[in-house]
Image (cartoon, rainbow, N blue to C red):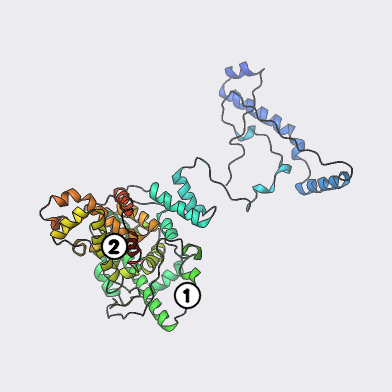
């Protein structure tokens, strides 16, 4: 909706004869004076209001132009004079405004004209919300880069519980998720228990069990429904691929084709299908599994941030099948590759700390397995996890490996002075998302190109 034309209109100059009387009159007298002025202005514009319709006026003007075009040139348009502002700073009311001349309106005010330009001094928060609500106003890759930069520098506005009205939509955009279909999600729910249902029930009751924020907002029943629906989707994808190896329409199953190459990590591993055990877990292979232990914690932030289970289902399905399919296979080969990369990257960013942990036989597979598998969602507090995930979705979930190294750097002095760092690394200290992101961005410059490529592709 455009701003009212009366909001920024200039003030009418007061009458010189009534200046002294106006200062002595009461507010009721002022209101009566304004009503008289408004009535005078409306009566003076009565003739303008009773003109023929716009179509009739346009036809009359066209007829006059045809008659005079042969002998007289068209008149030069007159530039209106600059408005004069009075010294009396009273807020303008609608009754004081002069009725605009609608015959001079142009087509630029209609819908479908030139794209709206954002204000010059726009608040970053308003700009971020405008990108999400109204969509890109220019080049798509440029606007997507701007969105990532705003997420990194300004962050998403959230309350003390980490709740944000636009977070789930920012995640869906950055993940290039397809359109949400609630009916499809309900159909998966109506199908009942999946092959992995028993294994899901064994894990859901302990999902973030000590986190009161999560327990207050997300029920175990909601978690069971979502994981069971994801298991059905992954199961159907295996059956469909075995029956029809043709490629699925990218616009329907992989989101917008324009964003597939703009996403930080959009790599799809291909290979022979896996075998499914009796409980629904995967025995190996190169395709995403149906369910593995740890997926319950990995999907918890999606349910917490989403406004519906259908939104969380779409975002989580895209995440595990496109960004980290190697994490949800039965062999969890992507997680083990990530653990090896934690040791490699720590030796690069902090050689002294890495050597000290190696002398204590403390490899990453002993203390960082849960942090790699769950993208640090296992470490409280949950609002800091959501803020860290904003960064990971903006610039790639593969940077979670460097975020784990950043947490070790934060604990550096304590670890180096401790005779037994094993006890300290049994549970990481509370997350500090901003500090972790700052250290990660700083350490990213130290990573060689070949190691960075391993980071990008380790979760495939």
Image location of residue 262, percent across then percent down: 46, 61
Image location of residue 290, percent across then percent down: 33, 74
Residue furthest to the bottom in view is 243
In the drawing, does residue 344 fall left or right of residue 107? left
Image location of residue 432, percent across then percent down: 28, 49
Quarter location, residue 96: top right
Residue depicted at 65% across the width and 47% down the height: 109
Residue depicted at 47% across the width and 47% down the height: 127
Instruction: Report the disc number at residue 19.
Output: none
Q: Looking at this view, is 351 or 48 the one in front?
A: 351
In the drawing, does residue 66 fall left or right of residue 285? right
Asked if residue 58 can be seen in this view, the reply is yes
Asked if residue 379 can be seen in this view, the reply is no
Q: Looking at this view, is 402 or 44 the one in front?
A: 402
The residue carrying mark 2 is 374
Instruction: Determine the CA span between mark 1 and mark 2.
Output: 29 Å
In the drawing, does residue 351 fall left or right of residue 235? left
Image location of residue 455, percent across then percent down: 32, 63
Quarter location, residue 17: top right
Mark 2, Cα crowd under 10 Å, few <14 / some 14-19 / many 20+, is many
- Helix, strand or loop under label 2: loop
Quarter location, residue 68: top right
Looking at the rendered structure, the number of numbered marks drawn on it comes to 2
Q: Looking at this view, is 124 or 49 the one in front?
A: 124
Q: Relative to 4, say whether 176 is above or below.
A: below
Residue depicted at 50% across the width and 54% down the height: 142
Mark 1, Cα crowd under 10 Å, few <14 / some 14-19 / many 20+, is few
- Helix, strand or loop under label 1: loop
Q: Looking at this view, is 67 or 269 the one in front?
A: 269
Q: Relative to 11, say whether 327 is above or below.
A: below
The residue carrying mark 1 is 248
Q: Relative to 433, say whether 253 is above or below.
A: below
């Amino acid at each position: 909706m455009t701003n009212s034309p009366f909001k920024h209109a200039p003030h009418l100059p007061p009458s010189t004869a009534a200046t002294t009387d106006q200062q002595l009159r009461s507010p009721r007298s002022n209101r009566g004076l304004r009503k008289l002025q408004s009535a005078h202005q409306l009566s003076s514009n009565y003739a303008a209001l009773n003109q023929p319709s716009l179509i009739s006026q346009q036809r009359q003007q066209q007829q006059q132009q045809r008659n005079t075009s042969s002998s007289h040139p068209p008149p030069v348009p007159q530039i209106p004079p600059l408005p004069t502002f009075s010294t009396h700073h009273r807020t303008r009311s609608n009754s004081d405004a002069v009725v605009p001349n609608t015959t001079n309106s142009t087509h630029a005010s209609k819908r479908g004209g030139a794209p709206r330009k954002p204000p010059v001094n726009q608040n970053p928060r308003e700009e971020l919300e405008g990108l999400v609500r109204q969509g890109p106003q220019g080049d798509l890759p440029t606007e997507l880069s701007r969105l990532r930069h705003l997420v990194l520098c300004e962050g998403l506005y959230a309350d003390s519980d980490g709740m944000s009205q636009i977070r789930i939509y920012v995640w869906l955009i950055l993940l290039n998720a397809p359109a949400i279909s609630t009916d499809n999600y309900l159909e998966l729910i109506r199908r009942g228990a999946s092959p992995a249902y028993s294994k899901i029930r064994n894990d859901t009751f302990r999902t973030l069990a000590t986190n009161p924020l999560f327990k207050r907002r997300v029920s175990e029943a909601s978690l069971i429904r979502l994981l069971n629906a994801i298991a059905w989707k992954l199961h159907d994808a295996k059956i469909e691929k075995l029956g029809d190896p043709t490629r699925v329409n990218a616009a329907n199953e992989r989101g917008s084709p324009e964003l597939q190459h703009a996403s930080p990590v959009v790599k799809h591993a291909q290979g022979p299908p896996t075998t499914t055990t009796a409980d629904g877990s995967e025995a190996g292979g190169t395709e995403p599994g149906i369910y593995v232990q740890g997926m319950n914690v990995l999907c918890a932030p999606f349910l917490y941030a989403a406004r519906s289970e259908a939104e969380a289902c779409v975002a989580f399905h895209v995440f595990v099948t496109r960004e980290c399919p190697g994490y949800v296979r039965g062999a969890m080969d992507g997680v083990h590759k990530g653990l090896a990369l934690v040791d490699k990257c720590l030796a690069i960013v902090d050689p002294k700390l890495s050597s000290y942990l190696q002398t204590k036989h403390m490899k990453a597979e002993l203390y960082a397995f849960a942090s790699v598998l769950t993208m640090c969602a296992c470490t409280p507090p949950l609002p800091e996890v959501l803020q860290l995930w904003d960064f990971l979705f903006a610039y790639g979930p593969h940077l979670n490996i460097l975020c784990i190294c950043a947490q070790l750097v934060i604990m550096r002095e304590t670890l180096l002075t401790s005779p037994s760092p094993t006890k300290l690394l049994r549970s990481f200290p509370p997350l500090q998302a901003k500090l972790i992101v700052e250290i990660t961005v700083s350490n990213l410059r130290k990573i060689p190109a070949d190691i960075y490529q391993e980071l990008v592709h380790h979760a495939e």
